Amino acid sequence: MGRRHKLSLRTSLWLAVAVTVASTVLGASALYGYQLYRSARQLDRLRVRAIAETYAAQVEPLLLTSSTSAPADYVDRLPWHQSVCLLAVLDPEGHVLAHRGGQALLERFLAVIDAEGVPAEGHTWDVPAIAEDPIPHLLLTAIPLRSGGSGERIGTLICAGRPAGTSTATARDIWTFFLCLMVIALAGILLGSWYLRQSVVRPLAYLTHRVMNTEDAPVQAELPTDRPDEIGDLAKVLIDLNVNAENWRRRTLELRHSLSRRVNTETAKIARELQAAKRKVWTDPLTRLGNRRLLDDKFTDVYRAQQGAGQDLAVAMIDVDHFKTLNDTLGHQAGDELLQFIGELLRQCLREGDLAVRFGGDEFALILPGVSCADARTIAERTVRLFAQRTSSLAIKPKPTMSVGVASRIEHHPASAEDLMRMADQALYAAKRAGKAQVTVYSPTPRPATVR
């Protein structure tokens, strides 16, 4: 696709269409002329047949009433048409009864009759001319002769005539002219189609292919931008559009990545804020332990997880004995400090996954997944002793102590998470009734475990 294209796209289209239309008109004219030629040939056949039937109508009565020599005399006396070359009468077996014309011509036509047989009905042949005859061909017509009453065949009339007004040179010239017209028309149509394909269809198809397959190679690759026509202009426009599209695509990707980063950053920030808010909602501000809401939100899920895994789950319910006496004697500040100490003490007992919760006032709970009832009692007894050591120096009587009730899923077989909490709570009340400052394991008749 170089500088050889000098015509514009519009000119190329007009030229290709004009050549194709002109060639089509030329071909139609050639076909029409050939049809006229064929019609003239058919008219000649009808004319010779009409002459033959006229002669047959005159000879037929003679065969019915005369002797064998009468047809020969009669044929010689018949008016001779200028286009007739031969006139002959045959008997039913095909023997010549009479003829008028050259003997050589008669023998030539008899050979045709012998080769194809005497037709039962009228028939016309195109017979090539003999070498010395300038006529390109003769028309030979055979007309059956029949008796008027019975319709029995009594002979055949043979008539050979020249086509009217058609010489050898004229027929050859007409056929050559028609053939040349058809060849020129076909060549023009092919040339116009080829030029249209090369100048318009192929470049447009190539542009379409390059635009539809920009992922394989840049659209600028091998586009005919140097053509001085509309194809070249279209190629330049496509390149500009592709460049603009690439720029917008790149900017869109950059914007998408930027938005994605911002969304991820904001999402992470919101998630942190939600976690902080959730921790704040779930945290008791004085002891920094979980609150009752945390227990309500988490305990049932923890219970179901341990139950599904077949693992144990222990609960220790804790209550501070004589806490009201401390508040009344030493004041609320001393009570808050003691609660903060309990928070530190219980946090030291926790592993990852354990929960320490302040119900409110001086009531607490330890949720210990995977811990048996015996181990939970050991943890509770250690907590009670450490708490007693801390409160032993307080100048009040009676001194604050801890009472703890313990229950576990595997040992006590609760029906639900709420049932397990109820068992631990009943064990706590049993410890307080038994004298306080002790750990009691749940049983239908809970037995206290004395703290030494």
Image: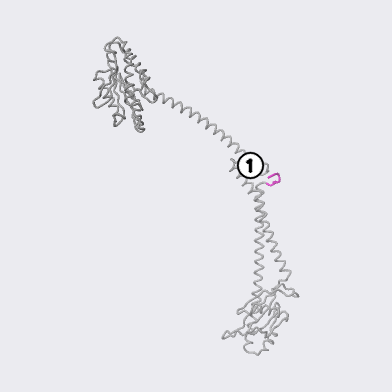
Residue drawn 31% across the image and 30% down it: 410
Q: Amino acid at mark 1?
A: Ala
In the picture shown, does residue 380 fall above or below 250?
above
Based on the displayed image, in which of its 4 quarters is residue 180 positioned? bottom right
Label 1 packing within 10 angstroms: few (<14), some (14-19), many (20+): many
What residue is pinned by disc 1? 235
Instruction: Tell me where residue 140 appears, x and y as whole percent.
Output: 67, 77
In the picture shown, does residue 170 fall above or below 74?
above
Is residue 109 toward the left or the right of residue 342 in the image? right
Which image quarter holds the C terminus? top left
Which image quarter holds the N terminus? top right
Front residue of 30/218: it is: 218
Front residue of 145/423: it is: 423
Front residue of 163/402: it is: 402
In the picture shown, does residue 190 fall above or below 34?
above
Instruction: Tell me where residue 213 appears, x and y as whole percent.
Output: 59, 42
**Residues drawn in magenta:** 1-7
Element under disc 1: helix
